[in-house]
Image (cartoon, grey):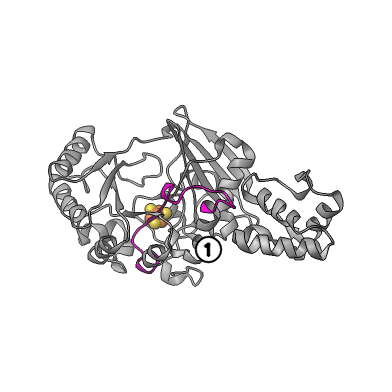
Amino acid sequence: MKQDRENLLDLRPADVVARLRTFAAEHDVAAYRGNQVARRLWTTPVRSFAEIAELPAAFREHLDTAFVLPRLELVTRQESADGTQKFLFRLPDGESIETVTIPDGNRLTACISSQAGCALQCAFCATGAMGFARNLAPWEIAGQVRELMLLDPPLRPTNVVFMGMGEPLMNWRNVDVALTLLNDPAAIGIGARHITVSTVGVLPGIEALAARPEQFRLAISVHAPLDELRQKLMPVNTKYPLASVIAAARGFVRRVTFEYVLLGGVNDAQDHAARLAALAIACGAFVNLIPLHPGGSRGFSQSTPGATAAFARTLRARGVEVAVRKSRGLDISAACGQLRVERLGRRPPTRAHEDADVHVA
Ligand code: SF4
């Protein structure tokens, strides 16, 4: 029965190989055929089993009867003058998510989503404003990269950041599998040091990420160096206050990055810079200063170039390594969640504690 077909894309590579080798044997086909199929799921992906030309035709039909390779449906693709591209994908249940690719020299970074919407309602974020729908399955997370590879092989990213829609560590169970799919050489094979999980500071998730043996990177959205201000910008600060987040960053097994969106007249004063420097030094963090994307910014404005430069100078003068990011994709609604909101409208906001589907590791 076609509707009962098993989804191979939700399995870890080792499990998929075992499953397919058994399946091959059950159909009187050499077990190595199972490895051939497994390679075509993620490493050099195909749209359907029919495309795996190296397999006997009858075995391809057996595969199609037993298994499914679900797709993300491309709704919109926009390209900015600076090369940034934004993709809106529809999921099988009608929800939609965004993926952004950002070229920079030899690097191509894919910014991927981990949830449809987000429950955390950061004050400056278009995704937060749309509310939470559901967690993405492993195949829907890693599948964003798979779709890029199917659309256009040069779009295979060199780097992946979990900075699209959603809070990845509120969906740890599925992000955990997706990290394996992205990193394992038997799947997509992107080096762990080129994969960054970005979080507001969900402590159980940080511990779970730290427990993985691979060198995945951790970025923490700080956005304010004081609880009172952070509370206003990021309601999740009630549950995970700054001190606990900083302690988790200090205890993380590898060097962390602080993400700090500069909001004009809100968090970009010299005093903020000095306090942020103290926090960064306390845990040896690198600081990324991010200009606010003007689209979907909900009443906030960008810091002036002068305020941005002064902020960075204060950090550097205190011994903090800092990068000032460029705003990319200004002409294509590339702020997280912005394209979806423009195309499909908002849904009523949902708070994390009201939604039983929000999974904290
Ligand atoms: S900034 Fe991230 S965590 Fe905050 S509401 Fe937006 S998607 Fe959620």
Q: Foreground residue, 252 or 266? A: 252
Under mark 1, the amino acid is Asn
Identify the residue at horizontal 22%, vertical 53% (top origin).
284
Q: Nearer the viewer, residue 156 or 115?
A: 156
Q: Quadrant of the C terminus?
A: bottom left
Residue, disc 1: 174
**Relative side of 259 to 311, left or right:** right
- Is 2 placed left or right of 135 in the picture? right
In the image, residue 82 sits, relative to residue 58, either above or below, namely: above
Asked whether the viewer can see residue 199, the reply is yes
Q: What segment carries the magenta color?
A: 183-205
Q: Quadrant of residue 311?
A: top left
Number of residues whose C-alpha sits closer than 10 Å to that of mark 1, classed few (under 14), some (14–19) or many (20 or more): many
Q: Judge by depth and name the residue closer to the eye, 344 or 218.
A: 218
Magenta stretch encompasses residue 190: yes
- Residue 185 on the magenta span: yes
